[in-house]
Amino acid sequence: MPFIPHTDQDIQKMLDVIGVSAIDDLFDEIPKHLRAKSLDKVPEGLSEMDMMRLMSERAQQDAGALCFIGAGAYEHHVPAAVWDVATRGEFMTAYTPYQAEASQGTLQLIYEYQSMMCQLTAMDVSNASLYDGASGLAESVLMAIRANRKSKSRKVLVASGVHPLYEKTVNSIVANQEITLDSVALGSDFRVDQQALQAFEGQDYAALVISQPNFYGSIEDVNALTDWAHAQGMLVIAVVNPTALALLVPPGEWGDTGADIVVGEGQPLGLPLASGGPYFGFICCTNKLVRQMPGRIIGRTVDLDGKEGFTLTLQAREQHIRRSKATSNICTNQGLAVTAATIYMTLLGYEGLSRVASASHANTKALAEKLTSIDGVELLSNGPFFHEFVMSVPGSARDVLEGLAEYSILGGVALSDLVEGADTQAVLVCATEVKTSNDLDVYASALSAVLASKGSV
Amino acid sequence: MLIFEKGAEGRFATAQAPKVMSSVADLPPEMLRQTRAGLPEVSELQAVRHFTNLSRKNFSIDTQFYPLGSCTMKYNPRGAHKAASLPGFLGRHPLAPESHSQGYLACVYDLQNILKEVTGMAGVSLTPMAGAQGEFAGVAMIKAYHEAREDFARTEIIVPEAAHGTNPATAVMCGYKVVEIPVKADGDVDVDALKSAVGPQTAGIMMTNPSTCGVFERQVEEISKTVHDAGGLLYYDGANLNAILGKVRPGDMGFDVLHMNLHKTFATPHGGGGPGSGPVAVGERLLPYLPTPIVGMQEEQGETRYHWIDDDALPNSIGRLSAFMGNAGIILRAYIYATLLGRDGLHRVGEFSTLNSNYMASLMAKAGFELAYPERRATHEFIITLNKQAKELNVTAMDFAKRLLDYGYHAPTTYFPLLVPECFLIEPTETESIDELEGFVEAMIAIQAEAETSAEMVKGAPYTQPVKRLDDVKAARELDVSFQRNSA
């Protein structure tokens, strides 16, 4: 029996001790007419060998394309040691460190993770993780509504340029508590439209959400935005890319006093694309807001002998203690993903992460130049960008991307697929450090060929 | 020693990053970072050695019996991890076109169908990223259902007092008021209390069955009728689904919506606190509200094509709960596990987890330990109370738990459910052999003897772990949650 070790003798001995004659007798408290018949629609079990064959075939179906899609999930080199160590059974098959003395490995690792995230974001406190960037933003919005005592509002202002799928996710989660989001319009340079922002002057919002870089890859003037929001009595929620933090001003230093809550998608820190998960959401905040933080937090303390040790702390915020008064319902989070990210950050250090960020930026700039030198292709991102840009292609972006896919190139995402009312010719493109200059050329020549065959040039 | 205290300025794992720093001169200077982030500065070997040594300070399923009640710490098949880590799966971008996604979509589609069958429900969405998010999705669907019928008076969710903390916390996140109802001395819900609690204000009830008391709720049909008659819906918390897998289906018990914990019932690794996965399944009337995305299938000219079903195809959906597809890789591992077990294997899960639990319960009762519900069958888990030991010997459940670590066993869940004093919630799972079960009981008998003769020694446990008991009060009062170089 797969994964069940019982011999016939074991079963008989156990039944005798219990005092029943068959395993089925153990279910005698369940009303007979409720008992399940066989699970006909579930296939017969496969051996590991046959399963590997099936899964290899399926994995092969999705393999082999050259991918220039970013839009919230980024292909970076993952050092071999990251997952080799993270998948040690002692990390992978432990659970929430309730028994601190027997979980010091996981606990110390999370403390180190929290410290690294505080360093990257220049914030005081980090938690142990949330599910992903999008649901993390929802938790940040709930946190800001609780924390901003000056504001009576149940509204949050969202700067254009926050990932459209994040906005959708936040809405699904916070709308149930009658919290609403208002958006500031996007400017023609794919950054916040300053004039549109001024229209919100003097209105009561609990927080302003700013994305840096934003969904379109553009770099926002976060200092001005932060100071404006604070002057309005709003908290500032920063949505940031952790790779970019190696190059750009960290949110703790934005404007005069820094952002209040920082949240983002941890995937770029050593997690494979893997169809969207598991990734992890990170969240950091100022000391002042720590008691409003959702999720687990690990603290350093001492044991009975005065020896350094680590333990879950401030648990009075959490559901298993506070029940209906908890800051969030989150329990299981993304422990193993955080384990991998911690090893990734350790291996790269600040120097390595800066190189990854700068190489991604350089590749993206080079790709933008190559592609926009093709007739009919124009760069729409006319402000500074990090490792993504928006370009316009002749005809329909969707058609062009389909054409590229036939060359095994995933050329980006059609903006109109994700953003309502977006330009149907616009494509969002990304090139990280994993792309070689030859990869960029392959993309450029395929795009030329696709456009030529469509006769749209 | 912390990783920050190892290494030297200027050192890093050179092989792991691009060879040189590229120019960023084109970016506005006022946007560029001026201060270095204080990340570790170590070699690759130092990093590998540090984290390998940290891992050795953990108890885990791979190294120890881990009978943590309500968490289903069963063996996590290596094959599932290996197959889910094939390059084609790891390299697939979540926004890749359907033409380059048929392999992954096929797995998701197949798992949706398997979960429908084992739960007896009409539809499944795999996107929720853990049990608590599954609960959120479920209660949000209940809310959407009532609101679509313009029944705005339903403002309360009923929760038995023994419920997991996530249940009331979730109801509040969905904008509901929580009404707790008592559990009787035999572990079943107090149906009279339920009857007086329901009314036109009742949106629904959240229940776990088998309950957190480790017994099967025998009046589930009466509860179902009571809540349905009042116009409410029934939510099934799948934390304990392992107990009944293949034996009884939540859909047949009258539940309208449920979540499953794939990291429990479907053997995906718990990862030191996640990632989990908490798919939801619904009956007919909640189908329009399922969270997106879901995978659909079409046969065209003899060819099978899988496709995404998103908000535009499901306009009344409660929407998206993550940027992409939840914990996609965990979904894959659960699918592989189900594929390895097949229909007969899934059926055996409920049987053997229940057999193991009842065997342990019998052994412990025979050894003189007090079962919380001695008249009841154990399910996949059972509760003992150490109240007598706490009163007579001043040795508490916490002390027994810490001493178990010295014997090489992870402690069961302690002090939950709250209504049983000084309790252990013990869940052995089906993948443990009779030897481990007997070894654990023998350790408990030995600790009992120690408690009778040398209580102080037991109260000082553990002695064999990297640290002794930790000062939690100091941890909370003198908050130190991030390393500062100057405070070291």
Image: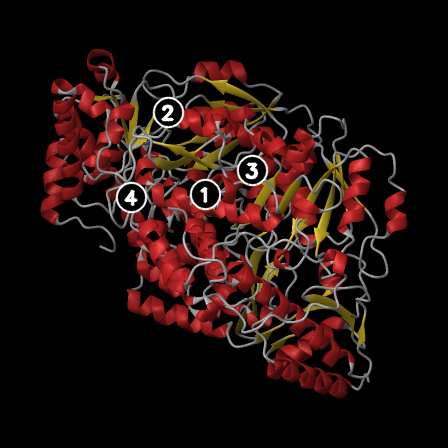
Residue under the image location 68 percent in, 28 percent down: B151
Q: Residues within 10 Å of mark 3 (few under 14, many from 20)?
A: many
Q: Which residue is mark 1?
A: A111
Q: Are marks 1 and 4 on the same chain?
A: no
Q: Is residue A415 left or right of residue B472?
A: right
- Residue B345: x percent and y percent? 29, 53
Picture colour scheme: secondary structure
Chain containing mark 2: B
Helix, strand or loop under label 3? helix
- Residue B316: x percent and y percent? 68, 45
Q: Nearer the observer, disc 4 or disc 3?
A: 4
Chain containing mark 4: B
Q: Name the mark on residue B417.
A: 2
Residue A218 in the image: above or below residue B198? below
Q: Is residue B332 left or right of residue A194?
A: left
Give the CA separation, mark 2 to mark 4: 23 Å
Q: Is residue A97 left or right of residue B232?
A: left
- Asked whether residue B205 appears in the rendered view, the answer is no
Q: Nearer the observer, disc 1 or disc 2?
A: 1
Q: Which residue is mark 3?
A: B136
